[in-house]
């Protein structure tokens, strides 16, 4: 595959951005959730 | 009771207030106009080529206008928060749409004065030459563009200007939104100046775009100003 | 303290697993199984992440606009609409950024430059800036309701501005017909596995978007509760100081 650097770069860059954001959201959710009561979490 | 007549009275009163504050403080003539002129001079330093300067004079003129507008809008709302004048008006139940129209009109007048100065500066510094029709077209462009700028500047200025810690938000919100004005006004002014061989007739469609922009933001601003600025 | 600490439920966990499976499939089809394009060669493979990214961004901003409209129109005014609008916009900004970068890389290979001033790219850059501004307005101080009201109005203004700017930019660029050099409208003819990979990409990213919005808006709810609680604590402390019971 020519231009492999660009192509893989695009895919990996996208993955990194999305995973980093998802990790941030999940981690934040977990941290805040620890101090929250059940009423404050309508999804449980 | 908010009737059309009382709304108009309020708008005129607000516009008059803003303009008399400006008249007394002379911020526009003493500080903003020199700033705009300096920007025009700096363009000459940066671009360093008289042929290019003459060719891009319209763009430079409108860039200088937009940068100066940031300062004027900030000023327009700092005078409000200084003594809580705007809050007092709103607490009194004054129609926010009318306040918006009044402030927009005042802003339009100030910007228009600035643009006349910038046009003169462009003619002098950048070697611009216009025919009579071109001058008319430039004038109409300025009127219509300024109408739009006044509305959108007041709308976002209300949100971002004046209040502490928010001033840096104004350029971020305002400059992208006025892109159509920059595009339209520059193209129309290019036609007015005859830059790069553009015919005067090519400018009028762009003035149409500017008019659409002005109408959209006059209406949107009147409706959205209250909810957006409500504290 | 509930045993489940976090914003996940069994539903989101199942969705998450599905998304991971789809992503792996997409990688296989996009990078390996599908053929190279006749004209573009292997560069077309970037499209399998680029097109779904911008597609997701459009969905995201559409959702923001709809939720903002609902929030403003309803008498009941549940803040959940505002939270979803905010979460959606944040994710939209992420995906516009991704699409601008991947598009730029694709452009470098296809046109030789990282950027061209054509109508679509310029409008996309404007889209990005607009919603960065929206997110900045969301972070202004105030009550949750003030934030919701401001943000909803901003989102609806964006709906007004984006077509206007797009139209202006189109008009502007139509003056400069450099279409031969950089014609983004030269559509690649996709068929067979290539078209399948593209659709797979759209489905994958859409489900990923749903998963992200669910988690993010739950996190926002927690943030808001936390802020409220902090406020309550501060008020209680103030009362104690004043000796009020």
Image (tube, helix red, strand yellow):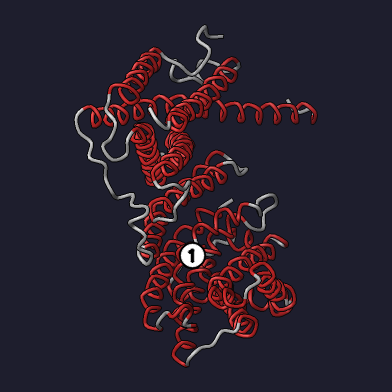
In the depicted structure, whether residue C237 falls above or below residue C157: above
Q: Image point 55% across, 58% down: which residue?
A: B174
In the depicted structure, whether residue C34 falls above or below residue C142: above
Q: Quadrant of residue C46?
A: top left
Between C219 and C243, the one nearer to me in the picture: C219
- Residue C142 position in % (x across, y down): 60, 43
Q: Image point 61% across, 84% down: which residue?
A: B120
| Residue indicated by mark 1 | B97
- Residue C156 position in % (x across, y down): 41, 51
Between B56 and C72, the one nearer to me in the picture: B56
Between C183 and B219, the one nearer to me in the picture: C183
Q: Quadrant of residue C143?
A: top right
Inspect this view and state whether residue B186 appears: yes
Q: Residue furthest front?
A: A2
Q: Image point 51% across, 88% down: which residue?
A: B130
Secondary element at image label 1 = helix
- Residue C25 position in % (x across, y down): 32, 19
Inspect this view and state whether residue C89 appears: no
Q: Image point 23% across, 32% down: which residue?
A: C195
Between B206 and C116, the one nearer to me in the picture: C116
Whether residue C49 sits left or right of residue B87 in the image: it is: left
In the depicted structure, whether residue C114 falls above or below residue B202: above
Whether residue C127 sits left or right of residue C203 in the image: it is: right
- Residue A36 position in % (x across, y down): 57, 18
């Amino acid at each position: 595959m020519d231009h492999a650097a660009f192509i893989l770069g695009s895919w990996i860059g996208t993955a990194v951005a999305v995973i980093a954001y998802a990790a941030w959201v999940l981690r934040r959710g977990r941290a805040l959730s620890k101090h929250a009561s059940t009423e404050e979490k309508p999804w449980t | 009771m908010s009737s059309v007549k009382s709304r108009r009275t309020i708008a005129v009163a607000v516009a008059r207030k803003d303009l008399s504050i400006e008249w007394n403080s002379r911020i526009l003539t003493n500080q903003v106009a020199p700033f705009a002129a300096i920007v025009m001079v700096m363009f000459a330093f940066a671009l360093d080529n008289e042929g290019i300067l003459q060719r891009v004079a319209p763009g430079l003129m409108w860039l200088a206008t937009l940068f100066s507008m940031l300062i004027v809008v900030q000023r327009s709302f700092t005078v409000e928060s200084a003594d809580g004048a705007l809050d007092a008006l709103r607490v009194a139940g004054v129609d926010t749409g009318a306040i918006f129209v009044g402030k927009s009109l005042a802003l339009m007048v100030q910007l228009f004065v600035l643009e006349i100065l910038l046009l003169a500066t462009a003619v002098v510094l950048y070697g611009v030459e216009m025919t009579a029709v071109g001058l008319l077209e430039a004038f109409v462009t300025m009127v219509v563009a300024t109408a739009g700028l006044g509305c959108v500047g007041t709308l976002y200025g209300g949100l971002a200007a004046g209040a502490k810690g928010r001033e840096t938000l104004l350029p971020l919100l305002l400059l992208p939104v006025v892109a159509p004005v920059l595009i339209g006004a520059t193209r129309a002014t290019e036609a007015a100046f005859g830059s790069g061989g553009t015919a005067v007739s090519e400018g009028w469609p762009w003035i149409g775009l500017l008019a659409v922009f002005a109408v959209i933001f006059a209406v949107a601003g009147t409706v959205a100003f209250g909810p957006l600025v409500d504290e | 303290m509930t045993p489940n600490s976090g914003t996940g439920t069994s539903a989101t966990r199942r969705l998450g697993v599905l998304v991971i499976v789809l992503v792996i499939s997409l990688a296989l089809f996009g990078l390996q199984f599908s053929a190279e394009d006749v004209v573009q060669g292997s560069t077309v493979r970037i499209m399998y992440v680029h097109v779904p990214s911008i597609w997701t961004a459009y969905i995201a901003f559409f959702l923001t606009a709809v939720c903002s409209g609902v929030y403003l129109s309803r008498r009941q005014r549940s803040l959940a609409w505002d939270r979803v609008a905010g979460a959606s916009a944040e994710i939209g900004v992420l995906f516009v950024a991704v699409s601008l970068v991947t598009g730029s890389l694709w452009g470098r290979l296809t046109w030789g430059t990282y950027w061209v001033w054509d109508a679509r790219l310029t409008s996309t850059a404007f889209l990005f800036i607009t919603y960065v501004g929206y997110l900045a307005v969301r972070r202004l101080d105030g009550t949750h309701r003030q934030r919701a009201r401001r943000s909803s109005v901003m989102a609806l203004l964006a709906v007004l501005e984006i077509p206007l700017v797009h139209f202006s930019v189109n008009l502007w660029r139509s003056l400069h017909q450099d279409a031969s050099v950089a014609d983004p409208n030269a559509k690649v003819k996709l068929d067979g596995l290539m078209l399948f990979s593209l659709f797979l990409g759209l489905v994958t990213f859409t489900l990923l978007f749903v998963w992200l919005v669910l988690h993010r808006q739950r996190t926002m709810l927690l943030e808001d509760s936390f802020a409220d609680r902090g406020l309550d604590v501060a008020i209680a402390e103030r009362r104690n100081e004043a000796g009020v019971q």
